[in-house]
Amino acid sequence: MRLGAAGSTALGGARLPSTGVLIGAAMVAIALLGLGFIMRGRLLGSTATVSPTTVPVTRQDLAAAVSATGTVISTATSKLSFATSGLVAEVAVVIGDQVKTGQVLARQDTSDLEPAVLQAQANLAANQAKLALLLEGAKPEDLAAAQASVDAAQAKLADMQAGPKGDDLAAAQANLDSAQAKIATVREGAALQDLAAAQAAVDTAKASLDSARARLDLLVAGPTQAERIKQEAALSAAHSGRAGAYARVLDGHDSKASPSDRIANTAALASAEAALKSAQAAYEEFLKGPSEADVLSAKQAVTTAEANLNSAQIKLEQLASGPTESELLAAQSAVVQAQTALNTKLTPYSDVDLLAQEQAVKSAQANLANKRQPYQQSDILAAQAAVLQSEANLAKALGNLAGATIVAPFDGVVSAASMNVGEMAANPSNNNPTFITVVDPSQMRVDVQVDESDIANVAVGQIAVLTFDALPGRRVTGRVMAVAPNGTLTQGVVGFPVSIEIQAPRVTSAPENVRGVAPEGARAAVQNARGANQGGAAARGLEGAGVRAGMTATATIEYERRSNVLTVPNRAIVRQGRDRFVEVRTASGETERRKVEVGMANDDATEITSGVTEGEILVLPLTAARASVPGGAGAAGLGGVVRPGGTFVAPAP
């Protein structure tokens, strides 16, 4: 057989296979090997047995929460430094020291600052004295006299310009009318009614004098026999009245008199006894006779009555004799004066008078201005500016001196101290200032970034549980105090800043009944902290819990909670389109797919509102097998579950 040039001869004359034949044989071998592996995989997949995991449908409290990470920040932090650069004389604290408000932390050398204050005070005093000299002007008494002259001139000018007033004219006219009426009365003489009244006054005075004299005579003569008989009769009648009243009272007690009659009899007896005492006193007074005081009073009454009678008789005689010449002259003079006064009110000032008075006002004002301001306005302004500059320099010098002592602005802890005794301290304007930092550990918060998908569930006032990377197993309660209205973009992720106030420390390692939710103990601690987390107690609590500014913290913010609801693990639920299903093991041991309605869910469990009942057993989907595809090798590596019939179920979320 002829092979042609393509062949070759082996050892011993035998021919070797061609290259194409070898390649074909290798491909066949590889295909057979791959088919063997595939068939082996099918056989293993069809014969493997996996025990399913089951869970019961249970009732429990279900809560949903948002988790975010951030940093602990002290809300009261103060970096303190000296007001000026200078030598550090004293550093009274070290990092970690507890300080109180007003406590001295450090002092600066003030050997240059104190003389600067004295120099500024001296400059201010000198400039103030110079300004006072400029402003002093005339003496106070000169100014007062000049001002009085201006006031008087202005007042007189105002009166001249105003002219006569209506009230003044009316008063002047009334005075004239009164004076004219009086002179008419004087000229006509006394009227008949005036004479009659004067005569009646004389008669009355005589009667009063007679009565006073009779009274005096009776007192001097003493009591008469008739008066004695009258006084004795009154006393006897009082005795009889008392005896009768007493008898009626006794009769009332012996007889069956009514209570009201007895009360009336008792009252009558008391009245009769009072009348008897009065009669006895009057009789005794009568027996004594008139006293010296009574006689003296009666004599004085006689003297007064005689004077009144004399005055009434003189007035009657004057009216009867007519007016005297002096009375006529006085009445005429009064009329002339009243007419002159009225003419003065009616006569206005002349233009010459007004111009003269206006000039007097201007002259007085010019004199006052000259007294007030003997210097130029520019001189005063310059002196005032010098005073202001001196005050500013003094304030700066005092501020620098006060700033040479660093004091704690509030109770807290020293967190940094970058100065040492003997070193030059740099002020805040320096690029590298020296300072002491004080923080208040009782006022801390945690700032976290919440993902934009969760921010809608976060609101001010919500409770948060805080954990710290540096404090494993410890939890501290907090409250959301602020939620930023705008998000921030960081490495392509939008987050919203949220501030959480650390309210009260609560160290606990108790497990949570629901993932991501504060246990009931922590929730109760938050409620108690609202009233108890005040002042030093809060500071001691935070320090006791080990919470420090700068720590990394994780906040779990609960935003929804439901109690005693049916729940299943999230892995038990399978999605198919918009519907959700679970695998339920029946009483016969078979598996039944059942549609369920869901409610609230968190990372671990989901609320079931319908479809299953409490106590039913669910079969969880397997997550280790691979799905089979008819006629193929299956979906290896997808982490799904193979069900009878080749259906692939994705792993539960």
Image (spheres, helix red, strand yellow):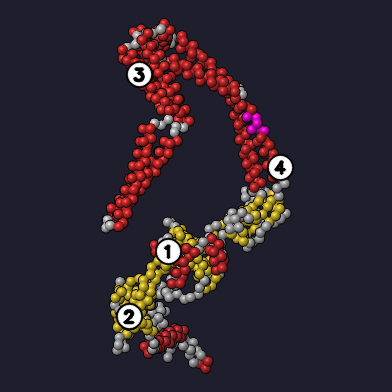
Residue 429 horizontal/vertical position (percent): 62, 48
Q: Nearer the viewer, residue 439 or 358?
A: 358
Task: Name the residue that disc number 4 marks.
Answer: 115
Residue 558 horizontal/vertical position (percent): 42, 67
**Total marks in image:** 4
Q: Are marks 2 and 1 in contact (CB under 8 Å)?
A: no
In the rendered image of this protein, does residue 624 appear above or below residue 128? below
Q: Nearer the viewer, mark 3 or mark 1?
A: 3
Q: Is residue 42 left or right of residue 588?
A: right
Q: Quadrant of residue 620?
A: bottom left
Residue 540 horizontal/vertical position (percent): 56, 65
Task: Name the residue that disc number 1 marks.
Answer: 462
Q: Secondary structure at mark 4?
A: helix
Mark nearer the N terminus (4 vs 3):
4
Residue plotted at (34% across, 8% down): 188
Mark nearer the N terminus (2 vs 1):
1
Q: Nearer the viewer, residue 446 or 475?
A: 475
Q: Residues within 10 Å of mark 1 (few under 14, many from 20)?
A: some
Q: Quadrant of the C terminus?
A: bottom left
Distance between the alpha carbons at the discs numbered 4 and 2: 88 Å
Distance between the alpha carbons at the discs numbered 4 and 3: 102 Å
Q: Nearer the viewer, mark 4 or mark 1?
A: 4
Residue type at mark 1? Gln
Report the span colored magenta.
Answer: 126-132
Task: Name the residue that disc number 2 marks.
Answer: 614
Q: Residues within 10 Å of mark 3 (few under 14, many from 20)?
A: some
Q: Secondary structure at mark 3?
A: helix
Residue type at mark 2? Glu
Task: Name the residue that disc number 3 marks.
Answer: 203
Mark nearer the N terminus (2 vs 3):
3
